[in-house]
Image (cartoon, grey):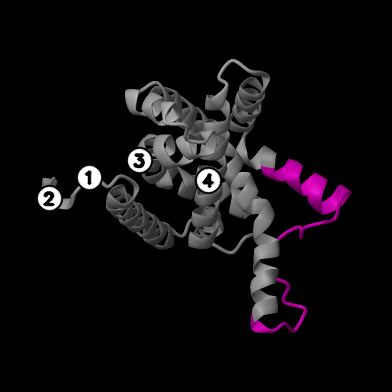
Amino acid sequence: TVLLVLSSLLLSVVVGTWLGVLAARNPRGWLSLSITVLALVGYAAPVFWTGILLLLLFALAIPIFPVSGMSDVTRELSTLGRLLDVLHHLVLPMSTLAIIYLAQYSRLARASMLEVLGMDYIRTARAKGLAEPAVLYKHALRNAILPVVTIAGLQFSQLLSGAVLVETVFNWPGLGRLAFDSILRRDHPLVLGILFCSALLVVVANILTDLCYRLVDPRIRVGGGT
């Protein structure tokens, strides 16, 4: 579950932020409109429906990825081969869980970038003749990404809840599938244990998010120092 959730979170944050930056470069252009429409469609689709569509498309119609499971237990593989096999099985469930949150990160990154791009130091950087990629990714994005990091830490619990449906659809052996089976069996102690582990993961994720603030924005210092 940690592998699935963290990979989905990383994919959605990186791709969503990149799409938000692209949309902010020309907020009234066709690219910005296309990114907004596609992101909102992905956000509006239920997670299990998106997973089933990806299964039908990329596992049955175009058999590129496996249908279910975390690895192929019928083959003897080396350590590297086993790792690649797990990553191959991870693509579809990771993409399913990440698609939902792409809209939020892209919209948030777009709004934050538009605010930062209107500040005086960005106009000064452009007046000095800096290339546009340097202005966007070195100066503007560094200051605009802090809200994205904040929301990513807060949404870790939602990713865990979404993992229940994703792991059930893709038969992924994790806490979500275990919780689903435990509810069907009415195994209350196991359900309580899973909820405790999930709550612990959420607390750890929020602590790591606070620690990431200093790495993202050097103006922030631990203990309120300057």
The label on residue 179 is none
What separation in Å lies between label 2 and label 3 (alpha carbons)?
A: 18 Å
What separation in Å lies between label 1 and label 4 (alpha carbons)?
A: 22 Å
**Rendering coords of residue 56 (x, y %):** 80, 46
Residue type at the position of mark 3: Thr
Q: Residue furthest front?
A: 128
Question: What is the secondary structure assignment of the residue under circle 4?
Answer: helix
What separation in Å lies between label 4 and label 3 (alpha carbons)?
A: 14 Å
Residue tagged 2: 223
Residue tagged 3: 150
Q: Nearer the viewer, residue 163 or 116?
A: 116
Tell me if residue 38 comes above or below residue 97 in the rendering.
Answer: above
The residue shown at (77%, 78%) is: 74
The label on residue 14 is 4
Label located before the other in sequence (4 or 3): 4
Question: What is the secondary structure assignment of the residue under circle 1?
Answer: loop
The residue shown at (39%, 23%) is: 115
Q: Nearer the viewer, mark 4 or mark 3?
A: 4
Place residue 172 in its image quadrant.
bottom right
**65 falls in the magenta region:** yes
Check contact, mark 1 vs mark 3: CB within 8 A. Answer: no
Tell me if residue 23 comes above or below residue 10 in the rendering.
Answer: above
Q: Nearer the viewer, mark 2 or mark 1?
A: 1
Residue tagged 1: 220
Circle 2 residues within 10 Å: few <14, some 14–19, many ≥20: few
Tell me if residue 214 comes above or below residue 73 in the rendering.
Answer: above
Q: Nearer the viewer, residue 153 or 191?
A: 153
Q: Could one spot residue 69 in this view of the protein?
A: no
Q: Nearer the viewer, mark 2 or mark 3?
A: 2
Check contact, mark 4 vs mark 3: CB within 8 A. Answer: no
Residue type at the position of mark 1: Ile
